[in-house]
Image (tube, rainbow, N blue to C red):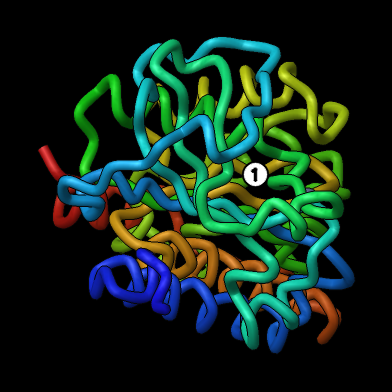
Amino acid sequence: MKEFFQENKKIAKTITEVAGLANYLWQKGWAERNAGNISVNLSEMMGDSEFELEHYPMFQLERSYDALANLYFFVTGTGKRMRDLAINPMNNACIIKMNKKGNAYHIISMKKRNLYNFRPTSELPTHLAVHNLLVSTGSKNKAVVHTHPNELVAMTQIPRFQTTEMLNKTLWGMHPEAFVFVPRGVFMVPYILPGSHKIADATIEGFKNGHEVVIWEKHGAFAIGETVSDAFDMIDILSKSAQIWFMAMQSGNEPEGLNDDQLLELKEAFLKK
Ligand SMILES: [Zn+2]
């Protein structure tokens, strides 16, 4: 018998896209061991599916996410490897349905016997906080991707790049397309304990202010997009800029970067009004 996530073509396509992305992240060296996590709001794809929720165990959350009541999410699992997810997504990720208060969830894609060693990502507080913001503001963005892009993380180890302003100026300055595709730039979150509500709160400040990529100092990147590929593309473009910066530095030359006039010209040409 086929499961609902195999029969529903839109959901099956989304899961295939996530598996493809998990493979890229692994190939890029951004997903060591269990690094990285992904979530997608599936609610609009669910149609009129009904679940007898009492058949699925409920997991209480520490906070309420009012905008997420009764919604469905694909969420990667804690301690799971991206390289395994690429091959077998539904053993390494799950679909959850939030309860009607938005303060607990049911895992609806796994047999009870498989649940003993499965829980959603330890960064669930940030994923849910971001989705809560996206849903409550009517955003088109449904996907949230967290990964560890080496060069971008390395830049945050350098004190002068630990501000939103300096990091953006440098990343935009390495390649004009970094500005064209990420015109709002990144938002820098100073180092905070991973998996905490504190880092979730700091992260949504960036998305509230219109950024689509948030950088966690000395840790990684969080990006939002209409699809997981859209979210990945933004991190990929910024990572290219960071690579160019390091290549120039490794050749013994401080890269020049685009000057203020050139950045202003890009702003006038490409920044959405
Ligand atoms: Zn991480």
Residue 136 in the image, given as x and y percentages of width and height: 29, 20
Mark 1 near ligand 1 (CB under 8 Å)?
no
Residue at figure coordinates x 30%, y 28% from the top left: 135
Q: Is mark 1 on a helix, strand or loop?
A: strand
Vertical arrangement, residue 124 with respect to residue 81, above or below: above
Q: State whether residue 230 is above or below residue 269.
A: below
Height in image: 2 above or below 35?
below
**Residue at the image point whose x is 25% and y is 22% from the top:** 137
Percent across and percent down for residue 152 are 71, 60
Q: Which residue is the extreme one toward the left?
A: 273
Residue located at (87% from left, 49% from top): 157
Q: In which quarter of the image is residue 104?
A: top right
Using the rendered image of the protein, determine whether residue 168 is visible from the camera's viewpoint: no
**Neighbourhood count class around disc 1 (C-alpha, 10 Å): few under 14, some 14–19, many 20 upward:** many
- The residue tagged 1 is 215
For the residue pair 152 and 168, the one nearer the viewer reads as 152
- Residue occupying image coordinates x 71% and y 55%: 77
Horizontal side of 258 relative to 42 (left or right) equals right
Nearest the eye: 42 or 176: 42
Q: How many labels does the image show?
A: 1
Left/right of residue 157 with respect to residue 130 in the rendered view: right
Question: How far across and down, in percent of the image, does residue 210 sit?
Answer: 35, 31
Q: In this view, does 139 lie above or below 85?
A: above
Q: Quadrant of the N terminus?
A: bottom left
Amino acid type at circle 1 is Ile
* Residue 234 seen from this side: yes
User: Quarter of the image holding residue 154?
Assistant: bottom right
